[in-house]
Each structure stands twice: as C-alpha cells, then as structure tokens.
C-alpha cells in the first residue's frame, strides 16, 4: 500500500457504497424498514411478523407485499442494506476532514463508538451478522454482500493502522472492533452528550493503546 493507504481504503469504501445507492428509496419502503428495526429492537428479531409490521405502519398486511414482494426475508435484507448505507454515509462524512492517518483513525473510532451507543439498531445488526456466521440464517447472496461490507470497513481501519506504523494491523484491528462493538457493555446508553464525548475520547485512547501492544511479545 502507499504511504497514505487509508485514503485508498476510503475511496474503495466510497466507490462500493455508491453501487448500493439508497437515495431513490421510496418513503413507504423506508417507513416499513424503520418499523421493522424498531420492532426488532423492542421485541426481538424473531418476534417480528408481517402482521406486526403492518400494524406499526397502519396498513393491511397484504399491502406490505406491494413494497416488498418477497415478504419478510426481503425486509430483513433491505433493512441490513439500509443500515449499512446510513452508516457508510456517516462514516465518510466523519473521516473527510482528516489530514493524516491518526486523525482518520480517531474519526472512525469516535463514529463507530457513538453509533454503537446511540443507535440500538447497530447492536441488532451486529447480532444478526454474528448469528449468520454461526447458523447461516441469511440468504447466500446477502451473506456475500455483508462480508463485503465488513471487509471494506475493516480495511479502512487496517490501512490507517498500517500508516500509523502498527505491525500485524489485521490482528490489532480485530481486537479494536470487538471493543467498539461491545461499547454498550462499558458505556451507558443513557449518557448525555457531554458524557458521550468523554467516553468517545476514552474509546480512542483505548484503541490507540491496543495498536501499541506487541502481541507477539505479550504472548511469550
């Protein structure tokens, strides 16, 4: 990779995100996806049926199929795609001002941490992806797309870590992402904005400390 490989990784992420363009998504479909996510967060993923979604958006269940002909499976798939699209847009906006790898890294960590704490659907998305890895609950084509999303996101972290001089960047990034995806276990969801900012700075400090650890020496 180049001396500024984080920029290349960001461009690759942006290029792929444009292929999953959601700017033309109809409002009716967005309302249904929002209802699905809210119901899944409140009651659990498996409890959400076409009927409960229809009740939430105040339409008759058969009308859902005019928006999503393939039913609940299509709603699940599109909710994942929509979630990632919104995350991707926010991520690119967060890293855009970065002038070096360190600023790029910090911006990614802060955004990742903040969305994990503030947006319950982030944890739902992580849980669904983890469940699929264990039990194969997603359609094959969607699983391949999810793998692409995760890889592109990780590559942004890995590229920045390498530019910052971190050896074995892949291993370090996996540990950092595990820390961030478990943010709600060490950061209260009801914290106010000032507390959230302090905790986000703490997440950056912890992530930088992980990058500094020599895993090979630590395991000896």
Image: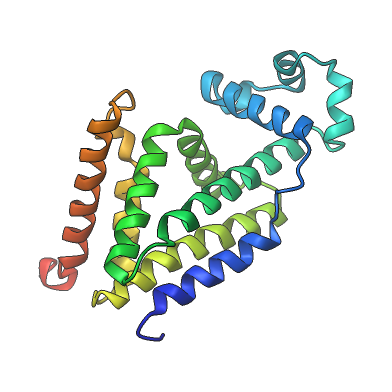
Position in image of residue 41 (x %, y %): 53, 25
Which residue is located at x 61 percent, y 68 percent? Answer: 15
Q: Is residue 133 left or right of residue 105?
A: right
Position in image of residue 178 (x %, y %): 33, 50
Front residue of 78 and 196: 196
Q: In this view, does 129 lie to the left or right of 184?
A: right
Position in image of residue 94 (x %, y %): 42, 54
Visible in this render: residue 137? Answer: no
In the rendered image, which quarter is residue 161 located in?
Answer: bottom left
Which residue is located at x 83 percent, y 26 percent? Answer: 64
Q: Is residue 19 left or right of residue 5?
A: right
Farthest-out residue, bottom: 2
Which residue is located at x 28 percent, y 26 percent? Answer: 191
Position in image of residue 28 (x %, y %): 78, 30
In the rendered image, which quarter is residue 163 located in?
Answer: bottom left
Quarter in which the C terminus is drawn: bottom left
* Total marks in image: 0
């Amino acid at each position: 990779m180049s001396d500024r490989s984080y920029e290349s990784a960001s461009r690759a992420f942006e290029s792929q995100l444009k292929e999953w363009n959601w700017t033309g998504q109809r409002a009716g479909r967005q309302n249904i996806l929002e209802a699905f996510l809210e119901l899944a967060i409140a009651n659990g993923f498996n409890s959400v049926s076409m009927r409960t979604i229809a009740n939430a958006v105040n339409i008759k269940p058969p009308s859902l199929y005019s928006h999503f002909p393939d039913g609940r499976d299509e709603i699940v798939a599109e909710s994942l795609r929509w979630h990632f699209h919104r995350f991707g847009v926010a991520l690119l906006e967060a890293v855009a001002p970065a002038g070096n790898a360190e600023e790029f890294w910090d911006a990614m960590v802060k955004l990742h941490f903040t969305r994990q704490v503030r947006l319950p659907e982030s944890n739902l998305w992580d849980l669904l992806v983890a469940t699929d890895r264990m039990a194969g609950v997603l359609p094959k084509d969607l699983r391949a797309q999810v793998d692409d999303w995760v890889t592109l996101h990780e590559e942004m972290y890995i590229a920045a870590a390498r530019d910052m001089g971190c050896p074995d960047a892949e291993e370090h990034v996996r540990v950092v992402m595990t820390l961030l995806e478990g943010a709600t276990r060490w950061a209260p969801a009801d914290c106010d904005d000032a507390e959230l900012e302090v905790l986000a700075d703490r997440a950056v400090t912890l992530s930088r400390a992980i990058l500094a650890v020599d895993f090979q020496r630590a395991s000896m």
